[in-house]
Image (cartoon, rainbow, N blue to C red):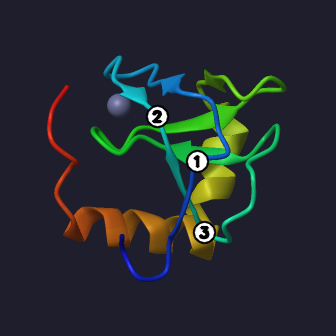
């Protein structure tokens, strides 16, 4: 597990809207259970999604994409992910 990310199993399996892989866990920057509006990054294709009310995933809006570009925690998570290979293949 990358150093500054915390593995949490508190999320239901979510299917990436981009590559279709089911992510069964989540790496959280603070280890807390994700909530509606939180950002999810696919472990396989690095696609960024937004958690919905029931912890499903949806595509981010343009405004959300712009906000992510300015969010240091997200940039840090992406740079950590860029250094570790995807966890196997489906
Ligand atoms: Zn994906």
Residue indicated by mark 1: 9
Ligand 1 within 8 A of label 3's CB? Answer: no
46 over 22 or under it: above or below: below
Residue at x 60%, y 69% (from the top left corner): 29
- Name the residue nearer the viewer: 84 or 90: 90
Residue indicated by mark 2: 24
Give the CA separation, mark 1 to mark 2.
8 Å
**Residue 35 lies in what quarter of the image?**
top right
Please state if 79 lies on the left or on the right of 76 as rendered: left
Residue indicated by mark 3: 29
- Name the residue nearer the viewer: 43 or 31: 31
Which circle, 1 or 3, is nearer the viewer? 1
- Name the residue nearer the viewer: 21 or 77: 21
Residue 19 percent across, percent down from the top left: 31, 22
- Image quadrant, ligand 1: top left
Residue at x 79%, y 40% (from the top left corner): 37
Please state if 20 lies on the left or on the right of 64 as rendered: left
Residue at x 49%, y 43% (from the top left corner): 25
Secondary element under disc 3, as helix, strand or loop, is loop
Secondary element under disc 2, as helix, strand or loop, is loop
Crowding around mark 3 (Cα neighbors within 10 Å: few <14, some 14 to 19, many 20+) is some
Crowding around mark 2 (Cα neighbors within 10 Å: few <14, some 14 to 19, many 20+) is some
Does label 2 or label 3 sit earlier along the sequence? Answer: 2
Give the CA separation, mark 2 to mark 3.
17 Å
Callout 1 touching callout 3 (CB < 8 Å): no
Residue 52 percent across, percent down from the top left: 76, 27
Q: Which quadrant: the C terminus?
A: top left
Please state if 77 lies on the left or on the right of 85 as rendered: right
Does label 1 or label 3 sit earlier along the sequence? Answer: 1
């Amino acid at each position: 597990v990358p150093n500054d990310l915390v593995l949490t199993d508190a999320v239901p399996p979510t299917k990436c809207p981009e590559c279709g892989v089911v992510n069964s866990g989540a790496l959280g920057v603070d280890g807390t259970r994700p909530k509606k509006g939180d950002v999810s990054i696919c472990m396989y294709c690095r696609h960024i999604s937004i958690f919905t009310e029931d912890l499903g995933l949806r595509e981010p809006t343009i405004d959300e994409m712009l906000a992510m570009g300015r969010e240091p925690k997200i940039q840090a998570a992406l740079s950590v992910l860029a250094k570790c290979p995807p966890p196997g293949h489906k």
